[in-house]
Amino acid sequence: MAFKGTLREFKVPDILQLISLQKKTGILTFNSLEGFVTLIFEDGSIVGIDAFPKKLEMRVGHVCVKQEIISEEMLQRALAIQKRTNQKVGEILIGMGLIDENIIPEMLKIQAIQIVLSLFNWKKGDYNFKILDHLNNDLRLLNPIAVDTLIMEGVQMLDEWPLIKKVIPNEDIVFEPVFLGNKKIELVSEFDDDRSSQDNKTIFLSDIELNLLKYINGKNKVKDLVEMGLFTEYKIYKKLFNLFNKGLMKKKEKTEIQEIEERKLAADLHSINNLKLKRLFNFFLAMLALSLLLTFFTPLRPIQNNNKLLKTQFYEQYLRITPPVR
């Protein structure tokens, strides 16, 4: 049994909530120009995720490299082994003694949530849910993830994203820390991190914000922080937004040299694109000329062949009617 439709008729949060409330077990697929995502459900909770073109295990391997847990060379070795054995990349890295086995589940969870939240931005596409009586063990890739929490975070993300984008309009922005002076920091829960002090001498931070603040060094771009995989993309953007509003960091001003280099890079890219267009145009002209030449000479070939055929026939007839010379 299955149910399917389009995202114009039924939105992602509604589909997830329906499966969760009815505690269904099965495979839910989303397909659009954005890509292809598969969610595995068991009793209404998500226990497995995969995506194309960015597969979950590739994301985790990339995160390990970005966090400098392993090198790119180590990851490529693990991927080469995976092609031969069909093992999971995480299992291979653990077996090689390159990472601790407790690291992988948390990384998988963060990247899995990231994939689900990305679905909330899909406006077009198709979905198909195939209901199963039971789930094979090889489909259980994650510790169960509650859908209700994901829906709440996804809806909150859609509401807050326009406001966040006003402060962080693109992923290439670099932030640098701001000197605190005589202000002190007090740790609070994640849900109280937007509190403000009455005397303006205390700054309330959550564990996530404090952890993220370590990477605000005037060098890392926003996309670098996202690729580290410490938290989901939305959570990183939101916490950066909070840190900016609390006065703990500011946007790094570009130096004159950087602006010159960026203009030079833009000019180089423009020249490269123009060169590509010029080559493409020349190739088109060459193919057009070749096509015209083939069109012009093609009718002559059958005539030549027919003449040769006629000559052969005439010669054979000549032999039949003409007595041989003695």
Image (cartoon, grey):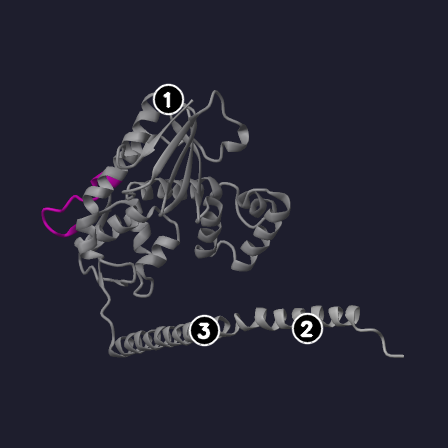
Q: CA distance from mark 1 to mark 3?
A: 66 Å
**Residue visible at 51% across and 32% down in the picture:** 139
Q: Is residue 258 above or below residue 119?
A: below
Task: Give percent across and percent down for residue 14.
Answer: 27, 30
Task: Give percent across and percent down for residue 269.
Answer: 34, 73
Q: CA distance from mark 1 to mark 2?
A: 85 Å
Magenta segment boundaries in residue numbering: 189-202
Numbered disc 3: secondary structure: helix
Task: Give percent across and percent down for residue 131.
Answer: 43, 24
Disc 1 residue crowd, few under 14, some 14–19, many 20+, Cα 10 Å:
some
Furthest-right residue in view?
Answer: 326
CB-based contact (under 8 Å), mark 2 and mark 3? no
In front: 238, or 312? 312
Q: Reading the chain from its start, which is encountered first: label 1 or label 3? A: 1
Q: Reading the chain from its start, which is encountered first: label 2 or label 3? A: 3
Q: CA distance from mark 2 to mark 3?
A: 30 Å
Amino acid on which the number 1 mark rests in the picture: Lys
Instruction: Report which quarter residue 87 is drawn in.
Output: top right
In front: 161, or 270? 270
Q: Is residue 66 above or below residue 5?
A: below
* 79 sits left or right of 62 in the view: right
In front: 102, or 10? 10
**Residue visible at 58% across and 68% down in the picture:** 302
Instruction: Report which quarter residue 56 is drawn in.
Output: top left
Question: Which residue has dot 2 on it?
Answer: 311
Amino acid on which the number 2 mark rests in the picture: Lys
Report the mark closest to the observer, 2 or 3: 2
Question: Which residue has dot 3 on it?
Answer: 292
Question: Which residue has dot 1 on it?
Answer: 23
Q: Is residue 74 above or below residue 50?
A: below
| Residue 163: assigned label | none
